[in-house]
Image: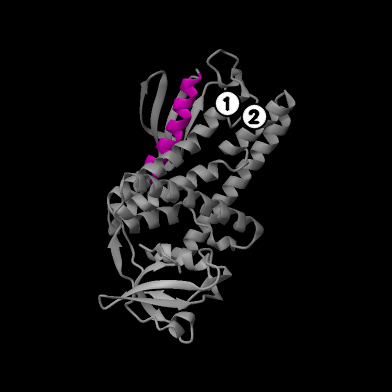
Amino acid sequence: MNILVSLLVLSALIFFHELGHYLAARFVGVRVDVFSIGFGKKLFSFYKFNTQWSISAIPLGGYVKMKGQDDSDPSKKNYDADSYTTKTPIQRIFILLAGPLANFVLAFFMYFIIALGSPNVLSPVIGNIVENSPAYEAGLKTNDTILSINGIKTDTWEDMAKLISSSNGTLNIKIKRDNFIEFKTLTPKISETKNMFNETVQRKMIGIGSAGVTHPLELNAIETVKFAVDKTIFASTMIFTGLQKLVVGDVPANELGGVISIVKVTSDAAEAGWMSVLFFAALISVNLGVLNLLPIPALDGGHIMFNLYEMIFRQPASEAIVMKLTIAGWAILFSLMGLGLYNDVNRLMG
C-alpha cells in the first residue's frame, strides 16, 4: 500500500510539472498533441482539448509532445501558426520554465498546508551537555529551556542554533529551569561538526544536544506564508548546493539516489502519516524543478540554453550541433539514472 502511495505521489508531481508546460504552451498558442504520465506502452488514454491524455506503463517520468517539437529528432520542425517552432525564443523559454515553476509553486502549497497543520518541531530544551564546554562552564543543565539569546526569542531548536552559529562575542542567555527564570552568560567556541552533506565544518557551538522534546508550531497567517516560502527556498538551495558538491567531488557519487530511493523514502514517510508524506513530496517536487533547470540538452534547462543562444546570436544553433548535444544530454541523463539505480540496488542489498 505504501509503495502505491509513493507511485501516486511521484506521478502527481510529474503531472503538475507537465501541466505547467501544457498550460504555458496553450497560453501562447501552441498545440499539444500528447500529454503523458509515464513512458512506453499506453495503458489508458482519452482525447480532449485537441490533446491525447495518456497513462503509460513505465511510471518514471512524463512528457508533453508539442506540435513542432521532437526531442528524438530535433531536425523535425513544423512551421504552422500553432507550432512550437514558430514561437519566439522568449515564448519558448516561457513554456520551458513553466514546468519547473509548477514544481516550485506546488512545493510552496504543500509547505503551506504543512504549516496549517501545526507540525511538531524541536523545542530548545537541553539534553546532553559536553564536559568543559561553554555551556558546562556557564552552569547550564539538562532539561533547561532556552527562552532567548541576546534578547531574541528562541521558539525552536533551529532558531537557537542559528543565533549561536551567527553570533559575535558573548551571549546573554535566558533560560527556564524548574519553572524559574535564570540568566547565563557564555562565549561560543568554534568546533568541528558535520553538516547535512556529511562534511566536516567549523561552527560556533556551546556544547549542548537536544533533549528531543517537541511542540506544535503555531503560526499566524503571515508566519504561515513565510514558513512556506522559507522552506521552498531552503530546499532549492540545498539541492543546488548538493549538486554542486556532487560535481566537484565534495559529495561521493555513491550518495546519489534514484527512483527506488524516492519510492522507499516516500513509502517510509507514508507510515509516519500524511504530514511526513507532504514534507518529502515537497522536497521531491523542488528536486524535479531544480534538476530540470540543469543545462543538459535532454532537459528543460538544455532547451532554454538553445533558445538563449538564438536570442543572443539572432539565429538558431546548428541542427548538427543540437543533435550531437541532445544525444550527449541523453547519455548524461541515462548515466545518472543508471548510477542512481546502481546505488539504490547496493543499498537494498546492504
Residue at screen point 56% across, 36% down: 300
Residue at screen point 47% across, 60% down: 345
Query: Front-most of 225 and 307?
Result: 225
Q: Secondary structure at mark 2?
A: helix
Is mark 1 in CB contact (under 8 Å) with mark 2? Answer: yes
Q: Secondary structure at mark 1?
A: helix
**Residue 204: x, y in percent?**
54, 71
Residue 331 badge:
none
Residue at screen point 43% across, 53% down: 262
Residue at screen point 36% across, 48% down: 223
Residue 113 located left or right of residue 242: left
How far apart are the two marked residues, 1 and 2, measured between alpha carbons?
7 Å
In which quarter of the view is residue 55 placed?
top left
- 210 part of magenta stretch: no
Residue 244 located left or right of residue 66: right
Identified by mark 2, the residue type is: Asn
Query: Front-most of 280 and 257?
Result: 280
The segment highlighted magenta reads 10-28
**Residue 244: x, y in percent?**
61, 54
Mark yes or no: residue 32 visible.
no
- 15 part of magenta stretch: yes
Mark yes or no: residue 162 visible.
yes
Query: Front-most of 230 and 109?
Result: 230
Above or below 239: residue 170: below
Above or below 117: residue 56: above
Q: Which residue is mark 2?
A: 307
Would you call the spot at circle 1 few (<14 residues within 10 Å), some (14-19), or many (20 or more)? many
**Residue 340: x, y in percent?**
52, 55
Identified by mark 1, the residue type is: Arg
Residue 92 badge:
1
In which quarter of the view is residue 119 placed?
bottom left
